[in-house]
Image: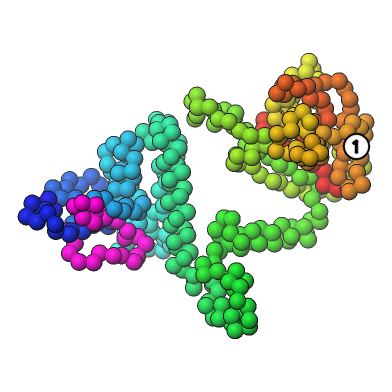
Amino acid sequence: MARERFKDDHNMQLKIKLIGRRTKDGRNYNLPTVDEVAALIVGDINVSSFDERDILIDSHIKGLKRISELHPEYLALQYPLLFIYAKDGYRTDILHRDVNVYEHTTQKKKRVTMREFFAYKLQERAVPTLVHLGRKLYQQFVVDAYTMIESERISFIRKNQNILRADTFSNVINASLSGNVVNSMMGNMIKLPSSFTGSARYMIKNYRDAMALFRVFGYPDLFLTFTCNPKWPEITRELDGTEVYTMEFQKRGLPHAHICLFLDERSKMPQLEDVDKYICAEIPDEINEPELYQLVSDLMIHGPCGDKNPSCQCTNTETKKCTKRFPKPFSDVTKTDKDGYPIYRRRNNGRTVRKQGHDLDTSCVVPYNPQLLKIYQAHLNVEWCN
């Protein structure tokens, strides 16, 4: 053991490496044959391969120096309360079920990816696992899993630039010879593909896909902004008493979607009066429609802002007015302003909603569809594309 060597010479510089590969099937519970969990490696143990980064102990004085998220023991060491039996976590050589790496098979993907591994760990079950009962530690585990997956993806992209058809250094040299010495104009060393969410190529690909749809179907008719409601039953039952605070319009990261709808020619809205059949911008009657009134009050009211709440993010600090075109003026019919933006029907019916000590009327209602709002019970803004 390493400690025996230290007894002989306290100044001896040793390096210990935990072997990341498994020679036996990790799905079987194999008893250890010796009382050692580490192998002593003499000499340089620097590794260049992404899947061989390991826990290293540099010396007796410095102690633990580095740990890789790809090591089978990483999860057990990082989350001892969630993995109390210290079973192997993710490693790069886990085979899919009924796959033998030494046999010929037509299956393209033989090994379990990191995303598949964590998807299995996070899957809901009839009997909750210890991981799901970890409360805040479980949330940390989920975030850690996400960063591990992203780190692996970026590392793959970095080491497979030729496969991804990235720009070569010759382009940089040509740009330099042409007189362009601004580094930001010469391209970057690492090119992210369109499959990497959020990259430049990803945004361009989605933009081109959208333009292709418009060429075929024309302009969209309806535009929906659909935001996750943190009070949905499937969320509240998982939080089990944990308090969640959100900002207006979910400015702190709740999932949301922007949806364009193309209506059939027989269902389009040729007249302004037809808009009122699909879009409402009024506070409903609390007596006749109590459910819809509560939903609109909780989810579809903008404000208070402007002079009622100067600290609101949408309030202009100089004019003390809302910068989001709210509140809207009252109108008995749907019409458009000089810029073509729809001004939906907002009859002054005298109904109000109490928000942060202020009574807000129909002019502060975000346009919605009553049927969709009842079905999904979330902030679902419906706009007519004119």
The relative height of residue 383 versus residue 168 in the rendered view (above or below) is above
Q: Main secondary structure of the magenta part?
A: loop
Report whether 213 appears left or right of 109: right
Q: Decide if residue 375 is in sight here.
A: no
122 relative position to 254: left or right: left
244 horizontally vs 292: left or right: left
Above or below residue 218? Residue 380 is above
Residue at image mark 1: 334
**Residue 34 part of the magenta-drawn span:** no
**Colour mode?**
rainbow
Q: Is residue 148 above or below residue 297?
A: below
What residue occupies the far left of the structure in this picture?
8
Residue 362's spot in the image, x, y percent?
83, 27
Q: Magenta stretch containing residue 48, yes or no?
A: yes
State how many labels appear.
1
Looking at the rendering, the stretch of residues picked out in magenta corresponds to: 40-62
Which residue is at 30% across, 65% downward?
47
Evaluate whether residue 109 shows in this view.
Answer: yes
Q: Name the residue located 69 percent from the left edge and 26 percent from the top edge.
A: 298
Quarter occupied by residue 137: top left
Q: Nearer the viewer, residue 55 or 181?
A: 181
Depth order, front residue of 55/99: 55
